[in-house]
Image (cartoon, rainbow, N blue to C red):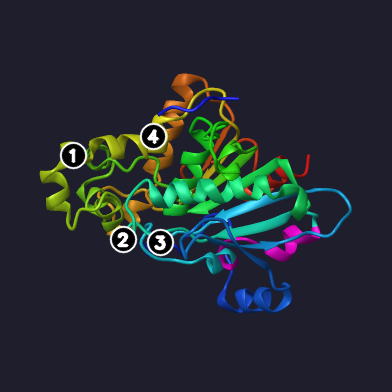
Amino acid sequence: MKMKHWLSAAAVFLTGIAYSSAATSIELASVAEPITLSYGPDVRNTLDLWQAAGPQATPLLIYIHGGGWLNGDKNQVFNAVNVSGWLAKGVSVASINYRYSSQAVLPAPIHDAARALQFLRYKATELNLNPECIALQGGSAGGCSTLWILFHDDLADPTSDDPVLRESTRVQGAWGMFSQTSIDPVVLSEWIGESAAAYPMVFRSVGANSYGEMMEDYAQYQLLFDEFSPINHMDALDPPLFLSYPKEMTLPPSTPAAAIHHGLFGVKLKEKADEIGYTTISLRIPGSAVPKTYANGNLFLESVLLK
């Protein structure tokens, strides 16, 4: 186990899985009400948990919603996750809320997501969950949080007075959908262009009010950008990852939303993975990258959760 170091838009781009509004209505009508739990002190530190039936402790899929860390809600799970399908397979599903960066800048949105994971591990026996079989799924900013948790050294603090924070943040795998693999505006300008670097998710994440203000004070924010860019934490021993992106690979991107969800985020992560020998990564971009192992993220998650 590794040790500790120190929007919305587009959330409808679900690569490899998509549900119409009609399908969402059917899903909402057919899935029993979840248990809603508070995992921290803030009003947005809540999660919904659908418990799979069965005598044995169940695997767990945790969904982290998108929205640029500025909006969105745990109910977005129904746009991305077939909750009833996972329950039928014996997998429990959780979907979390977290503080927006407009309420509390980084690290709050990502550390909240990590705490939700720790909370579910802490409550695993009570909730009939298998703490050694947990996977993450997230889209857009939720995908960025997902990758950060997957790659980051374990946040468990065995000396903490808070028993939740003593729990591990390591998981068995993750599916990131149109995930930002860096949030550093200098890097984004180099990879994709200024339309990605100037996206509100980026400057608002550190408390700046505009792209110009962020760049004027870039030195002040650089450590945050470095810390919360998932690509900076990846190593060869990290758990497996499935990455999926929309089809468009145009440069310059056609819209700001296309820019902040561009497939080059995945390409750049895969390039680094190849350099460092991280082999358990699958990248899917229609027309550009086809993984050799899994046709889609759901099949990948089944391989992680239903061993």
- C-alpha distance separating marks 4 and 3: 22 Å
Tag 1: amino acid: Gln
Upstream in sequence: badge 3 or badge 1: 3
Under circle 4, the secondary element is: helix
Q: Which residue is mark 2?
A: 102
Which of pointers 4 and 3 lies earlier in the amino acid sequence? 3
Q: Is residue 111 left or right of residue 90?
A: left
Disc 2 versus disc 3: nearer the observer? 2
Q: Which residues are magenta?
A: 78-88
The residue shown at (89%, 53%) is 55
Q: Quadrant of residue 158?
A: top right
Q: Amino acid at mark 4?
A: Lys
Dot 4: within a 10 Å radius of its alpha carbon, few (fewer than 14), some, or many (20 or more) residues? some
**Nearest the eye: 221 or 268:** 221
Residue denoted by label 3: 67
Q: Which quarter of the image is occupied by the C terminus?
A: top right
**Is 86 one of the magenta-colored residues?**
yes
- How far apart in space, not on screen, are marks 1 and 2 (Cα)? 18 Å
Pointer 1: what residue? 220
Q: Secondary structure at mark 3?
A: loop
Q: Residues within 10 Å of mark 1 (few under 14, many from 20)?
A: few
Do callouts 1 and 2 mark residues in contact (Cβ within 8 Å)?
no
Q: State yes or no: residue 303 in magenta.
A: no
Q: Residues within 10 Å of mark 3 (few under 14, many from 20)?
A: many
Closer to the chain start, of discs 2 and 3, is 3
- Residue 22 at x, y percent in the picture: 61, 79
Q: Position of residue 139 (x, y in %)?
A: 48, 54
